[in-house]
Image: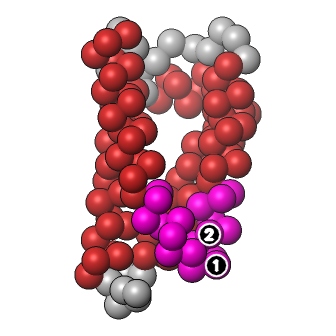
């Protein structure tokens, strides 16, 4: 599968997750066993996720391989930060699920960049 397709699909995952956090944050958090949102910060995070998802989708359509490579690094970084938040700051373990999705997406894109039919 071309790297652009992996980034495009990941972009839609981020966009849809972000829309869920903006429009119905307590429901999305409840799916992961997290307590309901009590302030607006979850919606702010969701808004940021919508924008990031948009970037992923646009860069996928432009076949921006520099972005694809940077996104692999960024998704591994995000996963590492979720581990740090849980271990060092006592954040709920369920955040690791979001980090795991980023690791899976990063590995998928990296594999497509290295072994795909669109290697530069």
Query: What secondary structure is the magenta-colored segment mainly?
Result: helix
Residue 2 in picture, x, y percent from top left: 42, 82
| Residue 34 colored in magenta in the image | no
Question: Residue at the bottom extreme?
Answer: 117
Q: Which residue is mark 1?
A: 62
Question: Pointer 2 and pointer 1: residues touching (CB < 8 Å)?
Answer: yes
| Residue 64 colored in magenta in the image | yes
Classify 112 as above or below 43: below
Q: Residue 18 or 120: which is nearer the viewer?
A: 120
Residue at 50%, 75% (x, y): give it: 65
In the drawing, does residue 6 fall left or right of residue 54?
left
Q: Which contiguous range is marked in magenta?
A: 54-71
Q: Mark 2: give few (<14), some (14-19) or many (20+) Cα within 10 Å.
A: some
SS under mark 2: helix
SS under mark 1: loop
Classify 72 as above or below 45: below
Q: Which residue is mark 2?
A: 59
Based on the displayed image, in which of its 4 quarters is residue 44 positioned?
A: top right
Residue at 38%, 19% (x, y): give it: 85
């Amino acid at each position: 599968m071309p790297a652009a397709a992996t980034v495009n699909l990941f972009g839609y995952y981020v966009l849809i997750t972000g829309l869920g956090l903006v429009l119905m944050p307590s429901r999305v958090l409840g799916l992961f066993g997290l307590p309901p949102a009590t302030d607006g910060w979850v919606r702010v995070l969701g808004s940021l996720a919508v924008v990031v998802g948009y970037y992923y989708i646009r860069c996928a359509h432009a076949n921006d391989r520099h972005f694809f490579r940077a996104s692999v690094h960024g998704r591994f970084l995000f996963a590492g930060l979720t581990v740090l938040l849980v271990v060092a700051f006592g954040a709920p373990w369920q955040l690791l699920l979001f980090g795991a999705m980023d690791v899976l997406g990063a590995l998928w894109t990296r594999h497509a960049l290295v072994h795909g039919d669109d290697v530069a």
